[in-house]
Amino acid sequence: MQTSSSARANAPVILQVIPDLETGGAERTTVDVAAAILAAGWTAVVVSQGGRLVPELEALGAIHITLPVKSKNPLTLWRNAARLQEVIRKHKVSLVHARSRAPAWSALWASRREKLPFVTTYHGIYNQSNAFKAFYNSVMARADRVIANSHYTASLIMDRHPFAKDRITVIHRGSDLESLAPASISTERKEALAAAWGLEPGRPVVVNLARLTNWKGQGIIIDAMAQLKQAGDSRTVAVLAGDAQGRDSYLSGLKDQIVRHGLEDQVLLPGHCADVPAAMALADVAVVASIEPEAFGRAAVEAQAGHVPVIVSNLGAVPETVLAPPEVPEDQRTGWRVPPGDAEALASALRHALDLPEGQREALVARALAHVSKSFSLSAMCSATLDVYRSLLR
């Protein structure tokens, strides 16, 4: 698709649209791609409802515009299309990239009216329980190019929206691997986070970094910790670091579950963790315990990049990030996969990972680092994304 002016083609202005910039993989990727856009000498514009990542985005030199794009109200969606048109005209936008369904409808209408290329990224496994949901979700497949963040997601899109088959590109979500290397984490950062979490020196630490919601499986981790305690392990501490984002009843339920198992000293709920590299540096094992399919599973990549053995639920796209038998021989393992929702299997994998002899742990960590460096780097993701933009701006 051609842009409407040579000026846009020579110095592209890329508009990303996302509901908010609070926390999460899609939000982090928005900031990372904005940085790559700026590094290419282009202009990065982001429209969202705001959030804790906005200062970081603006510090990069990107333009942030606050609009009510988190709303699903049909009238607001329609009005947002006009608002986005104003943004497009004011900033001479060359291409629009939407990262969620509600704002994607507004972005689709605006980009079509302005005759601009339109890109979407399928970041999630969207519920499609009825015809209305299927139609609502379909906006993510209506773009000139549809980015799937895993092969699992790409297969899902093709099953649900066959008309989009020839416009799908798989780009795995990338992580800043260098920032996660233990050598890059200062003692001060580790000590500050350990103090904030209330960790005692010398105790093994299991880390789960995920927003607090039922499908992320925090309850399964608590049950697994209870089994470890019953088996005589009263030293290991599990840190379930995530924001409840208003799900107060779920948070209360987790606290009750911890008390019920007598795990007040072994399971911590410290809230959102802003320093993921330091969290990995404190961890002996990381866990991704989702009980519903994930579209990607960045936490597993971050753990491997941070030299931390990782255990993941064997469903969705997460297994694409962690090599394990029977897919590969034992000597090529980079982590463990366990059945989703199986606390007993998770407890067994935790015991195995925590008890690994030092030599085996070092070998596992080295394989895992090589694996993620090859397939899940931030530079690879950003380069592939900008290649998509270039292909549409020719």
Image (spheres, grey):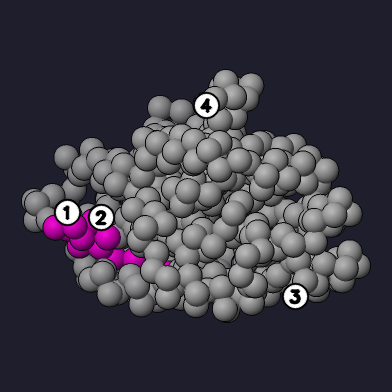
Q: Is residue 371 above or below residue 389?
A: above
Residue 25 lies, in percent from the top left, at: 49, 56
Q: Give the camera-side residue of 163 and 247.
A: 247
The part of the chain drawn in magenta is 35-51
Residue 219 lies, in percent from the top left, at: 79, 58
Alpha carbons under labels 3 and 2: distance apart: 37 Å
Disc on the earlier residue, 3 or 4: 3
In the picture, the quarter occupied by the C terminus is top left
Write the residue at 66% across / 64% down. 203
Q: Is residue 210 part of the magenta span, yes or no?
A: no
- The residue tagged 3 is 248
SS for callout 2: helix
Residue 347 visible in image = yes
Alpha carbons under labels 2 and 1: distance apart: 6 Å
Do tag 2 and tag 1 residues touch (Cβ < 8 Å)? yes
Alpha carbons under labels 1 and 4: distance apart: 37 Å
Disc on the earlier residue, 3 or 2: 2
Alpha carbons under labels 4 and 2: distance apart: 33 Å
Alpha carbons under labels 3 and 1: distance apart: 43 Å
SS for callout 3: helix
Please give left or right for residue 300 compared with residue 112 in the image.
right
- The residue tagged 4 is 332
- Which residue type carries mark 1? Ala
Please give left or right for residue 267 compared with residue 120 in the image.
right
- Which residue type carries mark 3? Asp
Q: Nearer the viewer, mark 1 or mark 4?
A: 4
Callout 1: few (<14), some (14-19), or many (20+) C-alpha neighbours within 10 Å? few
Write the residue at 9% across / 56% down. 7
Q: Is residue 40 part of the magenta span, yes or no?
A: yes
- Which residue type carries mark 4? Gln
